[in-house]
């Protein structure tokens, strides 16, 4: 049961094979028995059983939708009313949000059952879920390796059968990279497609909420609920929402796929290269036409990203000052001491590192050299993509340069860690949608490919993902 | 050495929107602390600002009123600093692309001449909360009711040359924003606050001297005093061979002095950058035109009209146009009595004195425009003399009722019955044979004595013109 898709579970509920309460109890039992992954920060057992009961009652009255009664996990970055929302930080260890994020509200309204809040890198800063105040999450495929990050708890929960699906957020690859490391389907939507209201901010102009699921079809089901304009978030776009499940079966005849040469150069693990190329072959078999393209500023996306994201983070995190909520140091002698010690005690190393970098990049005298330059690079990166989309429908490449690394392996070398995001960052800088799909294995660890679409072309990405998954079985594999 | 004074003002005007600039909380003044602070105002994690379109309209209206360029695309920025009453750790403001660009404002000086003062820009921003230092032993309380109240910061060019000009400019801005109805302009409640940048330089030179900034002055009177005392300090320091340090200073009204708040070495690095939670604000010509079409008559236009339509002098027209409420009041009085000159005299005389004495705003005048108009009518139709009308006015102000009721109750009705007046005159003549003799022998000055006696006899109620005429006749015998 635990490795079934949302679709299969939904069908099972509809057929009366099991109730939502039974399903929820099953998952809660698995979570309780799990000694390995540390996928959850908070488990909301009582609340989950209540929601499941309500879902069963709704179903009995004939009010069930596609997601009614399905148990899922939420990344602990989404504010959930009455439940601790820590964002993986000591700073918010005692924070119980008095309100509900738009994403979780929509999923609650659709009848999903929240099992709990998933572990994550502190304030979503990290690519391995090792920076969490609540300890690292481990990859269910190999407990010595990281699950990716920052949505590593969400990914591990789904991969280990501790949730049927999960929400994640993606600022520089934080949905797609853990999806690749944990053999899942992860959708990073177009910037502005999913409301950021109630999602704790990291890099405001980059942050995107999205689903982590077993299949593209599941992603479409969840995305149907998550997507849409929200008047509470003025950066959310008022563009009509597709029925993302409607086009899943569309044939791929004549689909133009661009392979950026920069995504297949030095630094790409050979096993990943061959897995991705095999996937390309499969799509060609289905009628897709492949074309080599160039995204010349790919490498520049790393410095641009590591200026813009920390710059925004440095001011987004200013509110954690010990004054209103969250961690406050003991016995401050004065205001300055209150700020300094509350922040020094509340934030972990990686968060402090990025606050410092961001503060420096925005400071007088350095703004032009760093922040302004980074924004100019961002514009050029966007232009590269738009040039590419004049010739191709989607862009295909690997999600990550290498499979999941060992816990601790890159913790002492932040730059090495940053380089692992090379294929995902530029998608956030450009605000484009990206979909990660399982496409192979290296040494028993999953490999993901990435599809990048033009703005609001999520339907197309999910369509390709679904067709690929109809023809392959990588996504059905589960950890030993 | 002769010194030239250079002053520029930054005026913060609280816009009178119902809700805050980026949240739905009320902007009402005087509520219990933190009862008007929403999740957004508290900077709860995950909350986002949504821009209040009402604030935009008000800012554009101001820009149009001063003939400024309106930014078709304006951008919000974050100004980063830590302070307990700044809940997000940054203030949302506008830096490089403000909604209102360059404009200008005419001010009239005491000698009747006009000067044009440049406005550099006016931008939208959110107000901070308030730190409460009383009532908290060893701690400070934070009230976020004011956090997020929309402000328009109006920045002038350094065009002002003395404190009086600065006050005239501040008054003019006050009058424009209240005419537009975009702010209540209540300085006591902080709806309008002003920072003054002051420097001096040897007369004839063009290079600017080192400036200091006097923060948060909140009355017309204090602006003048603060600038004067600061200018004198600059001159004294320089003439003593010292140098002015660029710094922010506070004005202490009790001691009439300024003192240092923070010097530039400790100035914050605000790390401005575009606010990623808000899209740039884009407006088009039709939007601007619509606001232009709905602008009310502004002070300068009103002064012209008062001169042309009501025949008022420049001075009267200017004084009566200073606030929209006063202008409306004056026009209402004129509408009733039909005599603009008389209406103007009463508004600037008795009414102004009353409001000044009791420190009341015209909006709360105890004598309504309707009652003053009726009172003037009673002067016009000779029911009361001009002199007694002042008593009637006092009666109205004291809440004794309408003009007619006060005249009735106080028995102030003018005596115009010539029989009655003649009887009083006869009595006075009979009682003062000596003075009659003097008058008839050519001592004209004694006439005034008789007038006084008759008026006294009538308790001031006799019609003076009639008294004069009848006295002349009777004394001529």
Image: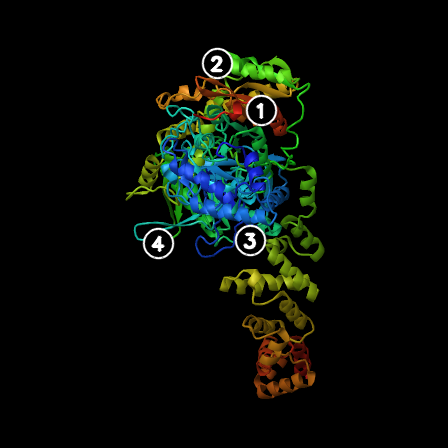
Tell me if residue A392 comes above or below residue B13 in the rendering: above
Same chain for labels 4 and 1? Say yes or no. no
Q: Residues within 10 Å of mark 3 (few under 14, many from 20)?
A: some
Answer with left or right where residue A146 lies relative to residue B12. left
Q: Residues within 10 Å of mark 4 (few under 14, many from 20)?
A: few
Q: Say which quadrant the C terminus of chain B sits in.
A: bottom right
Q: CA distance from mark 3 to mark 1?
A: 65 Å
Residue labelled with disc 1: A469
Picture quarter containing residue B375? bottom right
| Chain letter behind tag 2 | A
Q: Nearer the viewer, residue A159 or B359?
A: A159
Q: Residue furthest front?
A: A17
Q: CA distance from mark 2 to mark 3?
A: 70 Å
Tell me if residue A291 comes above or below residue B111 in the rendering: above
- Helix, strand or loop status at disc 1: helix
Disc nearest the viewer among 2 and 3:
2
Residue A271: mark in rendering: 2
């Amino acid at each position: 049961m635990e490795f079934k898709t949302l679709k299969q579970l939904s069908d099972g509920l509809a057929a009366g094979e099991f109730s939502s309460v039974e399903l929820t109890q099953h998952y809660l039992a698995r979570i309780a028995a799990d000694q390995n992954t540390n996928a959850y920060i908070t488990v909301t057992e009582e609340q989950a059983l209540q929601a499941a009961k309500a879902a069963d009652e709704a179903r009995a009255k004939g009010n069930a939708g596609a997601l009614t009664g399905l148990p899922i996990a939420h990344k602990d970055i989404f504010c959930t009313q009455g439940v601790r929302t820590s964002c993986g930080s000591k700073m918010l260890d005692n924070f119980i949000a008095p309100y509900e994020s738009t994403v979780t509200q929509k999923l609650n309204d659709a009848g999903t059952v929240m099992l709990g809040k998933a572990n994550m890198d502190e304030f979503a800063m990290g690519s391995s879920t090792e920076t969490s105040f609540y300890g690292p999450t481990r990859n269910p495929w190999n407990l010595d390796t990281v699950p990716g990050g920052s949505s590593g708890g969400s990914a591990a929960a789904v991969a280990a059968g501790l949730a049927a699906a999960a929400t994640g957020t993606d600022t520089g690859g934080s949905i797609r990279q853990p999806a690749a490391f944990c053999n899942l389907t992860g959708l990073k939507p177009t910037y502005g497609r999913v409301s950021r209201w109630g999602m704790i901010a990291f890099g405001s102009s980059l942050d995107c909420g999205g689903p982590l699921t077993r299949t593209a079809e599941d992603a479409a089901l969840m995305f149907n609920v998550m997507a849409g304009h929200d008047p509470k978030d003025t950066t959310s776009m008022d563009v009509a929402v597709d029925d993302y499940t409607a086009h899943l079966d569309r044939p791929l005849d004549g689909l133009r796929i661009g392979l950026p040469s920069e995504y297949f150069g030095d630094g790409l693990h050979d096993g990943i290269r061959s897995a991705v190329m095999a996937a390309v072959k499969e799509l060609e078999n289905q009628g897709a036409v492949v074309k080599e393209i160039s995204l010349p500023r790919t490498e520049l996306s790393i410095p641009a990203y590591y200026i813009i994201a920390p710059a925004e983070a440095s001011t987004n995190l200013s509110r954690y000052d010990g004054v209103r909520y969250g961690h406050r140091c003991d016995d401050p002698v004065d205001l300055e001491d209150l700020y300094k010690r509350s922040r020094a005690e509340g934030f972990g190393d990686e968060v402090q590192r990025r606050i410092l970098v961001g503060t420096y990049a925005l400071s007088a005298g350095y703004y032009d050299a760093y922040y302004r330059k980074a924004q100019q690079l961002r514009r050029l990166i966007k232009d590269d993509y738009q040039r590419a989309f004049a010739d191709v429908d989607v862009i295909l490449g690997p999600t990550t340069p290498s499979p999941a690394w060992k816990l601790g392996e890159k913790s002492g070398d932040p730059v090495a860690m940053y380089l692992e995001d090379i294929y995902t960052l530029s998608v956030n800088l450009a605000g484009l949608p990206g979909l990660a799909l399982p496409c192979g294995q290296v040494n028993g660890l999953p490999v993901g490919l990435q599809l990048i679409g033009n703005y609001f072309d999520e339907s197309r990405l999910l369509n390709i993902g679904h067709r690929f998954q109809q023809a392959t079985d990588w996504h059905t594999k589960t950890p030993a | 050495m002769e010194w030239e004074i250079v002053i520029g003002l930054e005026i913060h005007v609280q816009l009178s929107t119902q809700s805050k600039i980026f949240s739905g909380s009320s902007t009402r003044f005087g509520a219990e602390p933190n009862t008007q602070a929403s999740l957004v105002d508290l900077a709860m994690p995950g909350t986002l600002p949504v821009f209040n379109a009402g604030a935009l309209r008000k800012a554009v209206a101001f820009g149009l009123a001063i003939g400024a360029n309106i930014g078709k695309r304006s951008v919000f920025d974050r100004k980063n600093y830590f302070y307990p009453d700044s809940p997000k750790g940054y203030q949302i403001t506008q830096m490089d692309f403000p909604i209102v660009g360059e404009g200008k404002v005419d001010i009239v000086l005491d000698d009747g001449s006009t000067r044009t003062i440049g406005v550099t820009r006016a931008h939208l921003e959110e107000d901070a909360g308030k730190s409460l230092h009383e009532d908290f032993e060893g701690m400070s309380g934070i009230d976020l009711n004011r956090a997020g109240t929309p402000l328009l910061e109006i920045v002038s060019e350094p065009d002002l040359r003395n404190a009086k000009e600065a006050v005239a400019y501040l008054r003019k801005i006050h009058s424009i924003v209240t005419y537009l109805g975009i702010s209540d302009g209540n300085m006591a409640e902080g709806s309008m606050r002003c920072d003054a940048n002051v420097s001096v330089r040897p007369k004839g030179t063009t290079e600017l001297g080192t400036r200091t900034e006097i923060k948060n002055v909140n009355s017309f009177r204090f602006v003048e005093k603060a600038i004067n005392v600061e200018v004198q300090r600059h001159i004294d320091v320089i003439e003593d061979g010292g140098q002015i340090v660029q710094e922010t200073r506070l004005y202490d009204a009790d001691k009439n002095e300024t003192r240092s708040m923070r010097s530039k070495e400790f100035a914050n690095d605000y790390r401005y950058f575009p606010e990623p939670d808000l899209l740039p604000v884009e407006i088009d010509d039709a939007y601007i035109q619509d606001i232009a079409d709905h602008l009310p008559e502004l002070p300068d236009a009103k002064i012209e009209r008062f001169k042309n339509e009501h025949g008022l002098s420049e001075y009267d027209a200017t004084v009566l146009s200073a606030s929209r409420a006063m202008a409306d009041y004056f026009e209402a009085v004129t509408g009733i009595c039909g005599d603009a000159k008389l209406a103007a005299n009463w508004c600037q005389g008795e009414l102004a004195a009353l409001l000044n004495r009791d420190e009341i705003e015209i909006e709360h005048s105890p004598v309504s425009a309707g009652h003053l108009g009726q009172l003037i009518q009673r002067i016009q139709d000779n029911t009361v003399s001009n002199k007694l009308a002042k008593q009637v006015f006092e009666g109205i102000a004291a809440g004794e009722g309408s003009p007619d009721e006060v005249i009735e109750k106080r028995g102030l009705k003018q005596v115009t019955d010539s029989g009655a007046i003649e009887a009083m005159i006869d009595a006075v003549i009979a009682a003062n044979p000596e003075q009659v003799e003097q008058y008839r022998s050519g001592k004209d000055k004694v006439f005034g004595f008789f007038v006084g006696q008759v008026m006294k006899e009538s308790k001031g109620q006799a019609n003076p013109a009639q008294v004069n005429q009848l006295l002349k006749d009777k004394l001529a015998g």
